[in-house]
Image (cartoon, grey):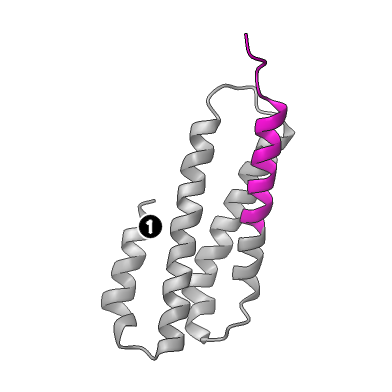
Amino acid sequence: MTLFPLTGQYMAHIIAVPEMADGQRMIYRSSHLYLLLISVLHLAWATALVKPPFGLLQKGISLLLTLSFIALHYGFFIEAASGDLERLVTSLGLYGIFAAGVLMAINLMTNREPPK
């Protein structure tokens, strides 16, 4: 979550996103929002993991979120600079987020305690 404000400052002051052409600016801003999304998902997942032991599903979700975090940061710093709309690593990061969300829902349904 700390990186999100820093990437905002990077966009505003170092690479001057507000002065860029519309397409390039759109790519940077969408990549920046993806960073916020993955940060919020990490926080949500951290609050869901409150009691060990953690099973294979929970470890897989954590790994997917971590890989998506890395992929989206790569996409922000490397792919967005190219200006190309076909950003493979960013797409893989977003697919990872989707898969992690589905697995989170499965985890919630399978680990729910019965009502008393």
Q: Is residue 101 magenta?
A: yes
Relative depth, front residue between 3 and 40: 40
Give the magenta-colored segment's residue range: 96-116
Position of residue 54 measured from the top left corner of the image (x, y, whole percent): 65, 28
For the residue pair 114 and 95, the one nearer the viewer reads as: 114
**Residue at the location (28% across, 68% down)?**
9
> Which residue ends up furthest to the top in the rendered image?
116
Position of residue 112 measured from the top left corner of the image (x, y, whole percent): 66, 23
Amino acid marked by disc 1: Leu
Q: Quadrant of residue 95?
A: bottom right
| 88 sits to left or right of 28 | right
Q: Secondary structure at mark 1?
A: helix
At horizontal 44% and vertical 85% (from top left) the residue drawn is 24
Dominant secondary structure (helix, strand or loop) of the stretch shown in magenta: helix
Quadrant in the picture for the C terminus: top right
Q: Nearer the viewer, residue 14 or 100?
A: 100
Q: For the point 35% across and 52% down, which residue is it? A: 2
Q: Tell me the quarter of the picture where residue 91 sits.
A: bottom right
Looking at this view, name the residue that lies furthest to the front.
115
Left or right, residue 38 beside residue 5: right
Residue 110 colored in magenta in the image:
yes
Residue shown at the point (65%, 18%) measured from the top left: 113
Residue with the most extreme left position: 13
- Tell me the residue that label 1 is attached to: 3
Query: Residue 68: x percent and y percent?
Result: 59, 57
Residue extending farthest bottom? 21
